[in-house]
Image: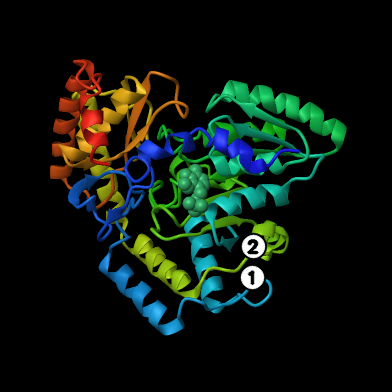
Amino acid sequence: MKDIFEKIEKNMGPIGEHSKESHGYFTFPKLEGDINPHMNFRGKSLLNWSLNNYLGLANHPEVRKADADAAAQYGLALPMGARMMSGNSDNHEALERGLSALVKKEDTILCNFGYQAMVSAIDALVDRRDVIVYDAESHACILDGVRLHMGKRFVFKHNDIEDCEKQLERAKKLAETTGGGILVITEGVFGMRGDQGKLKEIVALKKKYDFRLFVDDAHGIGTMGPNGGGTGEEQGCQDGIDIYFGTFAKSFALIGGFISSTKQVVTYLRYNMRSQIFAKSLPMPLVVGLLKRLELINKHPEYRQKLWDITKKLQSGLVAAGFNIGDTNTPVTPVYMNGSIPEATNMVIDLRENFGIFCSMVVYPVIPKGMIILRLIPTAVHTDEDVKYTIECFSKIKDKLYGGQYMADKIREGFAQKL
Ligand SMILES: Cc1ncc(COP(=O)(O)O)c(C=O)c1O
């Protein structure tokens, strides 16, 4: 018999194996100070493009006050227990009603973590006779929900409607033999590439294949649609989304999530989602803070307009400067470049240390070898100046990258001594 810790000694996992060189800098960095476009990293103020604070609510004075007042009034513990047992309140129910109105669904269930909500809702919705059809580039919470499924699943190529239909044909044949149904799962906005899920086209397939559609709109809630009601609202097909998921971790700048659907489906989820039945409900100050955020989202469409104004300036500026930003049609802005992992790390060090810019870097194994993505998340609180400065700096680092200046280990070696 082996000690299960033995394998950990040999293999820390694809990201963990780099922990020695990366911890505290590339992974687990500490961003300090108020949540703003400019935050402190290792004692220096950097222009930050890595937070999903889309509408700028994280440090909004009314939000800060509501959070503080609610914490003082209720304490952080209330209510104790799961919603079903002893953790319900009028505020929890008021927030659910408000969210239902925002996303135009009959009812909503609050969830204590977005990730767990997705996993657990998928688990509750399907049984072994049902078939799941899902997008290949789905977020980990969808993949993990699908992993719990005891029945069959078919994956379609990312946003490829022809392939989606092919998988639906297979799913339909199978479901007819098992006596089950079909659940299609995709995202409103794909957080890495920034492209929207082709929800309208998927909804159109319902006539032929008779399935239910579950959309993870973590990046779309608050950012997409004339009222911030999400990607279904943006594409004019919200009615065709049977089950809608939104997180509080992005536009709402808090933690937790919600699922909206018909009254009957939400009631079923309230009584069958294991992650909510067997876990503590959202603390009252969070719920009161979320009511304030929802009020601001409803009252101030100009925050969303500002987000889109900055997004358009950033994206058109990058394209005009010769950058490839792929097929994003949302605020998520990936900047694609070619280079090795050492070049990518040197470039990011240069960006942080010498240009004062902080953004996320994505490399192999998340994307193919030889590709680098620097991902920028614009927000309503970034300025035109921030955009202009960033595009200038990006042009400089691109020239350095393609001039081979990041190939030498000089920057990295010099830096490693400082770590
Ligand atoms: C597409 C998507 N789904 C789900 C989640 C999980 O949400 P939460 O952070 O609320 O757990 C995220 C967050 O990163 C996400 O990007």
> Viewed as shown, does residue 17 lie left or right of 163?
left
**Residue 111 rendering spot, x and y as whole percentages:** 57, 61
Determine which residue is flagged by label 1: 82
Q: Is residue 160 left or right of residue 55?
A: right
Nearer to us in this view, 160 or 416: 416
Task: Note whether residue 318 is visible.
Answer: yes
Question: Given contact means CB atoms under 8 Å apart, are the residues at marks 2 and 1 in contact?
Answer: yes
Residue named by callout 2:
276
The disc labelled 2 sits on which kind of residue?
A: Gln
Q: Residue at x 58, y 33 (%)?
A: 202
The N terminus lies in quadrant: top right
Check the picture and name the quadrant holding the C terminus: top left
Q: Is residue 28 above or below residue 163?
A: below
Quick one: which residue is furthest to the top in this view? 403
Is label 2 within 8 A of ligand 1 (CB to nearest ligand atom)? no
What's the mark number on residue 149? Answer: none
| Residue occupying image coordinates x 17% and y 26% | 395
**Residue 274 vs residue 100: left or right?**
right
The quarter of the picture where residue 107 lies is bottom right
Residue closer to the observer: 371 or 293: 371
Q: What secondary structure is marked by label 2?
A: helix
Estimate how packed mark 2 is, as few (under 14), some (14 to 19) or many (20 or more) residues with alpha carbons within 10 Å.
Answer: many
x, y (%) of residue 18? Answer: 42, 34
Circle 1 SS class: loop
Tell me which numbered mark, 2 or 1, is placed earlier along the sequence.
1
Question: Residue at the spot x=35%, y=29% of the render?
Answer: 373
Residue type for callout 1: Ala
Instruction: From the top left corner, tell me how far across and down residue 296 is, in percent.
Output: 34, 64
The percent position of residue 273, horizontal first and vertical second, equals 68, 58
